[in-house]
Amino acid sequence: MIRRALMLLLLVIPAAPLPMIAQSVTTSTDSTPPPPRRPKPLLAVGEVTGINIVVQRMNWWLRHADWADISLKTWSDNIRLGWEWDVDQFRTNMFGHPWGGGFFFNAGRDNGIGFWGSTPLTFLGSAEWEYFGENERPSLNDLYNTAFGGIIFGEVGHRLSNIVRDNRARGFPRAMRELASIPLDPVGGLNRMIRGEAFRHADDGPLRDHTPLAVDLQGGVRLAVDSGPQHRSSWSGTMLIDIAYGSPFDKPFHEPFDVFHLRFQFSPAQGGINTTRILGRLYGRELTDSAARLRNIFTVAQKFEYLAGPAYHFGGQSVETGFVSNWAATPHAHIQSELYGEWLLLGGIESPGAGVRERDYDFGPGAGLNASASLLVSGATVLSARWRFAYLHSVSGSPADYRISHASIEGLLPIGHALGIGAYAGWYRQLSDYGPGKGLTYSYPELRFYLAWRRGQWRHPLQNPAGNGP
């Protein structure tokens, strides 16, 4: 529900027509770099509350949603009755709410507040909505998913939008950059329009993000198995984007999410969004000499994961602790690996016997292990393998324990400098233990063949302090 409302909100944010924006950024000539933004916590809190009010009223006035009919009595009932587990669709709870929580985090970051200072805003925004935005009892799973997932989506969107935007650009390219940044940082995009920054030509100053990106765009076909008794396989077109922001081996840890990795896969004929995985570094400490051939870095990371195949659904918010390593086998060939222990704060997993009205999945905390290894040649990943194991104990739904394993291998054959042909093979296995003699085991393979376009270590040019930039 809130996901649809936020999508509607995105439609009204870019209020100025594209030609008007293009004209504005062409005629404005103020080249003074914007100063570092001073923290404005009260304004950030006001914007969090304003987001909830706008979304809530839009759902009632425009959509006439039954759940949006609120009053003092519904507020009182929500406070008096307390928390429950809701029965929304898997995608709404495990993807829509985390993405929506990023709005609240963006409000803090755009108002000059740091990572840790913006974190409470996701909990505030979620609690406001749960108690006062609906006439249904507040949902505990929504609080977890919106708050913890919002931290990840908000910080990643904040950083990527600062790369997409370019205050030195003019005309149509500038307008396209401003509009392209809105899905990443909706609150920041709206604030830039209000402050006039979206239309002003200027040096970027200290606000511009120059962190290098490695981008991998893939398009191809995907073979997956459905959940029917015959386990029928089906082919679908598929698209994937893989983004590596920074590198743990380039420079020492500086601040949360100075390094993160994002993978997003979409297959229209197989449920839409199949994979979203974001892993951001919260802390890192080098355990070896930075000039050594074999380097090891102790790392604490936060992860959001969403897996949705035709036959299975799994996702959650987690914190991971472990090691990332790099072995320079030759000057041009490196092997990088990751090994993490995982604390699953709250996960969701498909369960036909969930037993919570129409909901067909369970909620619960858990733990796991994650391991991966990649071969990089001249900075490009040509072969990678990944394995993860997770245990989840249901606290809402069926009385069950779940064990999943997910293994995959992927290879890429470079063609020239930027293109490549690749293949991916994955295997998802789920053991559902409902009690003595009631266990079920599911195993589902997946194949993918694709054409890839890669751009490694791409960054914007640094500002020229003596002028308006190159």
Image (cartoon, rainbow, N blue to C red):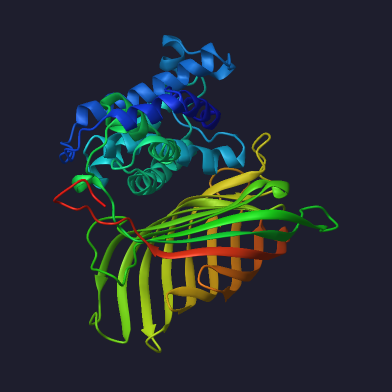
**For residue 452, what is the image quadrant?**
bottom right
Residue at (27% x, 32% y) in the render:
200
Percent position of residue 422, x then y = 62, 70
Q: Indicate the quadrant containing the N terminus: top left, top right, bottom left or bottom right.
A: top right
Apparent side of residue 321 relative to residue 413 in the rendered image (left or right): left
429 lies above or below 122: below
Is 370 placed above or below 71 here?
below
Q: Nearer the viewer, residue 430 or 187?
A: 187
Give the residue at x 37% y 27%: 23
Residue 436: horizontal and vertical position, in percent? 69, 60
Front-most of 257 and 397?
257
Q: Residue 282: name its quadrant.
A: bottom left
Query: What is the total number of numbered labels drawn onto the structure image?
Result: 0
Q: Is residue 77 left or right of residue 268?
A: left
The residue drawn where x is 71% and y is 54% is 237
Figure check: 104 above or below 390: above
Q: Residue at x 53, y 43 (%)?
A: 95
Q: Nearer the viewer, residue 18 or 248?
A: 18
Q: Is residue 40 left or right of residue 390?
A: left
The x and y percentages for residue 98 are 46, 41
124 with respect to 98 (left or right): left
